[in-house]
Image (cartoon, helix red, strand yellow):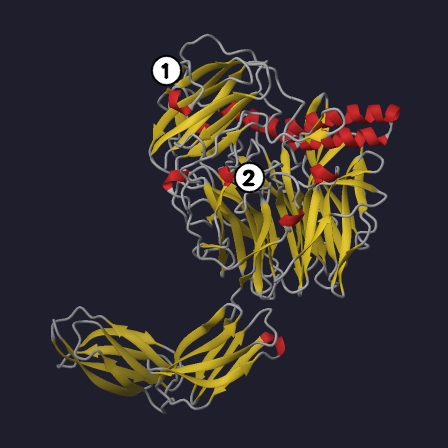
Amino acid sequence: MRIRAAVGIVIGIGLAAPAAHGSVAGLPARRELQRLHQEIVTGELAGLAAERDEALARARRRGVAEVLARMHAALTGAHDTGGRLEFPLRREPPLPIPTTLGVFPPPVAPPNVRLNDPRADLLLGSAQSETAIALHGATAVAAWNDGEGQRTGPNMMGWGFSIDGGATWTEGGLVPLADSVAAWVSDPVLTVNERTGTFYLAGLVITSTARNGVAVMAGHATPGGFAWQPPVVAFSVRDTLPDKPWIAADSSADRVQLVYTLFVRKDGHGSDLVAHQLSADGGVTWSPPEPISNGSDEGLVQGARCAVGPAGELWTAWTAVDTSLASDGSDYLRAREARDGVHFQPEQTVAHVFSNFGSGGPGYNRGYGFAWPSLAVDRSRGPARGRVYLAWNESVDFYADSLGGAGVVGEREPDTAPTTATPFTVGRTLEGTLSSRDDVDWFRFGGTQGQTAVFFADSVADSLDLSFRVVCSDGATRLAFDDPGGTKKRFIAFTLPWSGYYYLRFAANSQQGGAYRVRSGWHAGGGERGRDERDVFATWSDDGAGWADPVRINDDPAWFDDWLPEIAVSPDGTVWATWYDWRDAPASACGGVSNIYLAHSLDGGRTWSAAAPASDAPTPWSLVTSNLAPNQGDYIALTTDTHAVVPCWADGRDGDPDAYAAWVAAPMRIELARADAEDGRVSLVWRAPAAAGTIATLERQVAGGAWDSLAVLATGAGAELAYDDDSVRAGVRYGYRLALADDAGPRTAGEVTLEVPLPLPLAPAIERVWPNPTPGVATVRFALPDDRPATLALLDLAGRRVARRVVRGAGWHDETLAPAVRAGLYFVRIEQAGRAVTARLSILK
């Protein structure tokens, strides 16, 4: 999303002032909330379109320089004050600094690396957020939105690189410009061609002809450094606004794929669609934009992603808001595949998702949330090769909740501070009036840990631009925040992380005031996937036609937020996910402190490991100063290679948002491919995907004893580790495993246990019966010399048959007997082709 600190143009339906105090029916607000969500998607950027159109009209009279200044002001929230630009952090009155957050113990996590150099920052709260990262060998490149651009001009994207596998970083400053690109605006994203080592950076730009556009820049590692080629404008136009670009390199054909959302003005209203472009020459030239979202979703789509599979197939995915009369309030996750990278298959609906669109994670300073999908494709040589994965955050289904039916509470003046807040119980309707920007209204409510409170400002005076927050019991820690700018109504759904009191704070963003009405209620629950204000889910498909049931990835308690997930697949097929996680926040912070968490799946997304922290220091966002919104970014980043998985995120531990990353050693994935036991020999084969040159020690265990080193193995053709053990004895059980010492430390993998069979006799034979005596159930081990049918029978002392079954197959068999007989002495008999053998069995009751 574009960098914003304030919005000057309001697009939406004008609303009358609230009615006089009175009761409000406690009915679900489903249709109103659906329409509000749509307005948030299109309203803000439609307002920017109007601002841009006005600037372009002036350009025809006054030149390009003024256009760049005005467009930059609109996109960053800056305003002209007599020759200089100022950048407000936000329009609402500031909250006090929290004083009770306490000390936060660092989580157990790998060492983190700060990617930007804060010594170069000269602005208060200079933010480096909305991160991207890509790896190729020892070279790593990262990019981010950069608040230092507010000092140096309209260029708002920074970058850095490492040539030693991420150990040390060099900040490159702001992303370089060229004759075609006058400014990089926001939304950096990176990809790399795995074959050529070419990195590609895409982002939103203002062109030198004062048009909005998307540009792509290619770069390569150089001896001792990194160099970018001049950027190429892939798309630019006057009458639309591109947003949220995503890029993917196709290493099989040197193609580069690009998708983004186009916001347009249609019939006097804001609308949008998802567009795709292709470069078949490594980013030098680009095909014209092709709409790939369906026409019925115009004005409802956002958050497009793209990823390339192992055969050059292109996957795209995005979110579409459902405003139909039949909707239950959920959004759609849409996906399309172009199997040849060019021609798209029909659109697929992946899942229905309840999006908490009202607010982002605790402390997020952009006034709305979203549930855009993250996308990855398995390019490994493993069994899930070609599988596509989507991950997203999803809330409870608040659309069905009844709001405001328990009576009306009017504000009690004075209520300009937490100490004088108007108390209310959730379920009531709140009514108040703000006289001006200097007026603030506080309300206080209580609740129990795990309850989700729903607040809907369904009526706001035309004169009032309302700011709406949930604040911790300390009166300062910022939790949920709704202030989308392009709409009138306001909405928050927030799950209480601790039992106690919380506050609602209302403020005016402009000098004009007005009346407002807020309907409140507790979420009733209804068996939906999401447990609280946000959980992280993933699904997968092998063909795009069928998608697995979504699986929840995060394993924190059901009252902490989980926000901005990213998903990636390692070269060995391990699936990884990362996200902002608030589980480590102490009670005094009301869930307002985050870390980055990481989890993985070894079975193709079906099950996930316990989540572990990837950040080695927490961020109390209410203590973080940022000159950009979003302070946490609209997305974070995750990438992998054969040695590590690397999350990259905006981190506020140093007082303002900085770009951080963690090199988490990825355990080498070892898969047992084959284990055969024959007379006098055990044959073993393990596969080590994406681990050429792997060396491992083969360890053996005899009959449950100690593990001993047997041999040293190295990968050969097909990344296989193979061994034939000829030193085994028939009838003995052996265990085998591989001992490794990779970047993740010493460990074992691929353990298997099997028994070497006894040689086949020339006639039926019973090797043993156990346990003997038995309380009623026994196992018979016997051998048949050929495939002719045989009879397994249990006889009493008189020779009468009390149990019988037919068995087949040459070789050794283990058959269980559980006869319903009295205690006594019996005989087990095996008979085949006129030859028989017996053994005694004592049964105790």
Q: Quadrant of the C terminus?
A: bottom left
Q: Residue at x 56, y 52 (%)?
A: 567
How far apart are the alpha carbons under marks 1 and 2?
33 Å
Residue 281 in the image: state x and y as whole percent.
Answer: 82, 55
**Between 490 and 343, the one nearer to me in the picture:** 490
Number of numbered callouts drawn: 2
Q: Residue at x 58, y 69 (%)?
A: 689
Q: Residue furthest top?
A: 20
Looking at this view, is 471 or 1 the one in front? 471
Q: Which residue is mark 2?
A: 371
At label 1, the amino acid type is Gly
Mark 2 neighbour class, 10 Å CA radius: few under 14, some 14 to 19, many 20 or more? many
Q: Is residue 175 above or below residue 701?
A: above
Tell me which numbered mark, 1 or 2, is placed earlier along the sequence: 2
Q: Which residue is mark 1?
A: 407
Residue 549: image x %, image y %?
A: 48, 48
Please say whether residue 291 is visible from this viewpoint.
no
Q: Between 599 and 166, which is closer to the camera in this rendering?
A: 166
